[in-house]
Image (cartoon, rainbow, N blue to C red):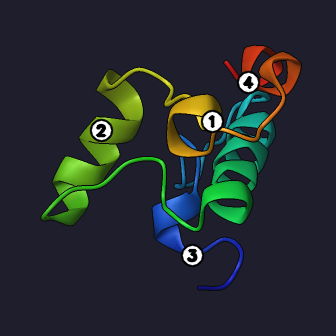
Amino acid sequence: MTCHSFPIFGRSPFPGHNPTTGALDLGCTLYWLLTAQVPYVGDTMVSKVMAHREQKIPSLLAARSDVPEQLDRIFQ
């Protein structure tokens, strides 16, 4: 997987990004780097976009128990 491939984008991978998009992209990339999993999954592109928008931010601790609690709080 390369950086900025769709599965690790934040909530708005399309033109018209708002100022928070970069932070969301970084958060999704951090999740992937620490867990080797994408933070949101779906069967179709639309379901993946909706998961980014509607699901809670996943816990790093739930995916990897050795992550410091403080990092998980910041991530949330």
Give the mark toward the camera: 2 or 4. 4
Mark toward the start of the polypeptide (2 vs 4) = 2
Pointer 4 residue: 72
Q: Amino acid at mark 4?
A: Asp
Considering the numbered disc 4 on the image, is that residue within a helix, a strand or a loop? helix
Classify the position of the C terminus by image quarter. top right
Mark toward the start of the polypeptide (1 vs 4) = 1
Determine the image quadrant of residue 35: bottom right
Pointer 2 residue: 51
- Label number found at residue 9: none
Determine the image quadrant of residue 59: top right
Mark 3, other Cα within 10 Å: few <14 / some 14–19 / many ≥20: few
Q: Amino acid at mark 3?
A: Ser
Give the mark toward the camera: 1 or 2. 1
Q: Amino acid at mark 1?
A: Leu
Pointer 3 residue: 5
Answer whether labels 1 and 4 touch (C-beta < 8 Å): yes
Report the residue at 71% width, 75% height from top: 3
What whole-number distance in Å separates the C-alpha atoms at marks 3 and 1? 20 Å
Give how far across and how far down residue 36 sits, in percent: 58, 68
- 58 relative to 18 in the view: left or right: left
